[in-house]
Amino acid sequence: MSIVEYRISKRVAHVVMNDPASRNAMTKPMQNGLITALRDAEASPEVNVVLLSAAGDSFCAGGDLKLFRTFRERPGTDIYLEARRSADLFTLLGEYRKPIVVAVNGPALGGGFGVVCNASFVVASDSARFGCTEIKLGLFPLVILPALRRLLGDRKALELSLLGDVIDAAAAERLGVVNKVVPHERLMEEAGAIAARIASFSGHALRLGMEGFRNTTDIPPDKAIEALLALRVVFCHSEDLHEGASAFLERRAPVWKGR
């Protein structure tokens, strides 16, 4: 049994964190599995959207506490290299070129919260919980801090980081961390429906749209508009835009070419 399960169905890559015994903690195998699955999905022409979920009662408990206890006895270079893999994962999530729908079934803490903050669309069970609890361990949420600041702004990101509070799904929805809260038993049905809806659109449009979104995140609006205008030319020359406009005018379903 793989610690990260991966399958493709109807242009949706289903990625499942499958280590319920550790509450899907961000161990090295978990990070490696997620990176491999996400890279495979991003490169596959058969995938329009990723649906990320978790087995068991927790979404992700965050860092590997057993590993933390060994750090004092290890060289700093080893610790840096361990952290490098975590940085690789969150860099990949922050730059991802396809939509990621996340289904949060339970606690999403530390690195798990960071995964949620990097998602394109988040569906949460009404029993889900969210938080940056690193401060309670004598740590700070360093690697996920850019995602927190981008999503929540400096003041709220600092509040959650400094206090280590755990918030419920309703509070997360009010903050914009979660798009939709549903009863626990309907979580995968709702998340699956949203992923399927996104997957039904042009893969070409989704990729270019995500590229435009990612590339203009941290630049001034006037510069962003110029960059997006150039990207619009690529859209206008695409087969999918021609097909989409033709299908609408002819009152039929479009047949996307993905280019």
Image (cartoon, rainbow, N blue to C red):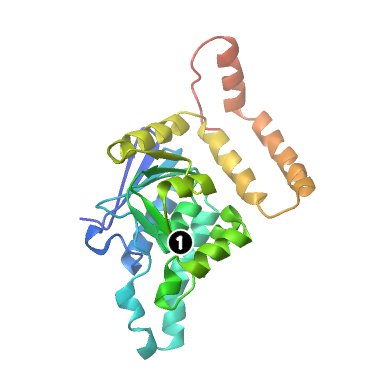
Q: Which residue is mark 1?
A: 89
Q: Which kind of residue does numbered mark 1 sit on?
A: Leu
Name the residue: 50% across, 49% down.
177
Point out the image quarter for the C terminus. Answer: top right
Total numbered circles: 1
Q: Nearer the viewer, residue 234 or 80?
A: 80
Q: Secondary structure at mark 1?
A: helix
Taking the image as shown, residue 25 lies to the left or right of residue 168, namely left
Name the residue: 32% across, 65% down.
29
The reply to whether residue 173 is visible in this rendering is yes
Point out the image quarter for the N terminus. Answer: bottom left
Taking the image as shown, residue 8 lies to the left or right of residue 100, namely left
Return the residue found at the far top: 250
Name the residue: 50% across, 57% down.
92
- Is 219 located above or below residue 62 in the figure? above
Q: Quadrant of residue 146?
A: bottom right
Residue 91 % position (x, y): 52, 61
Residue 188 % position (x, y): 32, 38
- Is 159 located above or below residue 170 in the figure? below
Q: Quadrant of residue 64?
A: bottom left
Residue 73 % position (x, y): 36, 90
Residue 256 % position (x, y): 50, 26
The reply to whether residue 35 is visible in this rendering is no
Q: Residues within 10 Å of mark 1 (few under 14, many from 20)?
A: some
- Is 133 located above or below residue 147 in the figure? below
Return the residue found at the far right: 222
Name the residue: 49% across, 68% down.
163
